[in-house]
Amino acid sequence: MTTTEARTTTLPTIAFLGAGSMAGAILNGLLSPVVSVTGGIRVTSRTAEKAAGFAETAGVTAFATESRADANREAVRGAKLVVLAVKPYLVPEVLADVAGDLEPDAVVVSVAAGVTVATMEAAVPASVAVIRTMPNTPAQVGRGVTGVSAGSRASEADVALVRELFETVGAVVEVPESQLDALSTISGSGPAYVFLLIEEFVKTAIAKGFSAEQATLLVEQTFLGASELLAATGEDPAELRRRVTSPKGTTEKAVEVLQGASLSTLFDRATDAALARAQELAKG
Ligand SMILES: NC(=O)C1=CN([C@@H]2O[C@H](COP(=O)(O)OP(=O)(O)OC[C@H]3O[C@@H](n4cnc5c(N)ncnc54)[C@H](O)[C@@H]3O)[C@@H](O)[C@H]2O)C=CC1
Ligand SMILES: O=C(O)[C@@H]1CCC=N1
């Protein structure tokens, strides 16, 4: 007899410093019934209002820096995993604040764009491991993809633990740190490119005479349907495109126009711009 059992994940105490869009998306995965966080989850945010929202969730303790100056320090005490999810420019300041309160065997997991492992390792005690990651917001619905780069002090067990954390919200790709900024320009920022395409395509549909409601349905269902077709068939996207593009038909004409617009050059330029910004962020 075969039984299908959901894989269960057990994680140690986790502190999220900076409970914004990204931390919220990851937290969503941790609230799944097949995930157990022994010792609980702590989250911190700047405002008391945001913290109060998180505090309503069972198993989550929330602290706001505007209500208590030691919020981040309190959150990291006793935490094995410390997820840094503040804006990149705040990372040095937050690490300097909590460095003395980190557990000696803590693993600092940064999701911040650009900020290097070297910067973070220099800011925490030598016994504390650092792992840099780059998740994306579809983590919120369990469809994220996260790049993970081990710092110089991270053990295989530390990396395995961080992999488990991010696998609760999607797929994980391990890359050397030298590739993480490039990965960010693809999958970290990628959801924004997709949403931009959807926004623009909806405007086109409205210009073709459809109501906003109809245009939204036509475009969103097309993106969702095409993505699910890709996932379900496992076919090459070029082959799936060929099946839409009847020889001497209508799609062929539209695809010719799109290819004539040098889409690949445009994506190269866009991702190069994101990469340059990551390098600026690394300088602080
Ligand atoms: N949004 C995205 O798609 C992705 C974001 N990231 C990274 O995630 C990090 C956070 O980005 P978002 O979630 O988009 O930003 P956000 O602005 O939504 O969240 C940041 C949070 O930090 C809190 N905060 C500010 N100062 C704080 C302090 N001193 N202590 C504790 N909390 C504090 C704010 O209240 C806010 O809730 C950034 O470093 C970004 O590079 C990484 C991958 C994707
Ligand atoms: O825009 C940013 O800087 C972050 C990193 C990747 C997605 N959002």
Image: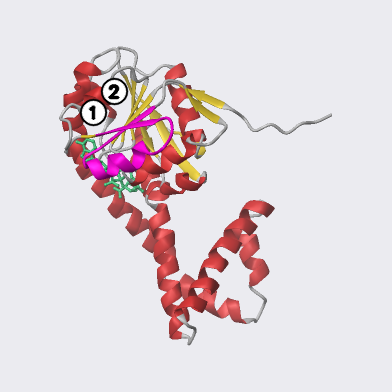
For residue 161, above or below residue 142: above
Image-based side of 102 in relation to 246, left or right: left
At 59% across and 77% down in the image, what residue appears? 251
Q: Residues within 10 Å of mark 1 (few under 14, many from 20)?
A: many
x, y percent for residue 246: 67, 76
Viewer-side residue, 271 vs 127: 127
Q: Is the distance from the Cβ of mark 1 to the nearest ligand 1 atom less than 8 Å?
A: yes
Dot 2: within a 10 Å radius of its alpha carbon, few (fewer than 14), some, or many (20 or more) residues? many
Check if residue 195 falls in the magenta segment: no
Query: Where is residue 61 drawn, in percent x and y?
Result: 34, 30
Locate residue 228: give its quadrant: bottom right
Residue 18 drawn at (x, y percent): 28, 37
Q: Position of residue 54 (x, y in %)?
A: 35, 39
At mark 1, the secondary structure is helix
Residue in the picture at 20% in, 30% down = 94
Question: Can residue 87 be seen from the camera position used here?
Answer: no
Looking at the image, the residue that sits furthest to the bottom is: 209
- Can you say which quadrant of the picture contains the N terminus? top right
Q: What residue does disc 1 label? A: 72
Q: Which residues are magenta?
A: 41-63
Quarter where residue 33 is shown: top right
Q: In the drawing, what numbered circle is on residue 76?
A: 2
Q: For the residue marked with disc 2, what is the amino acid?
A: Val
Is 213 on the left-hand or right-hand side of 78? right
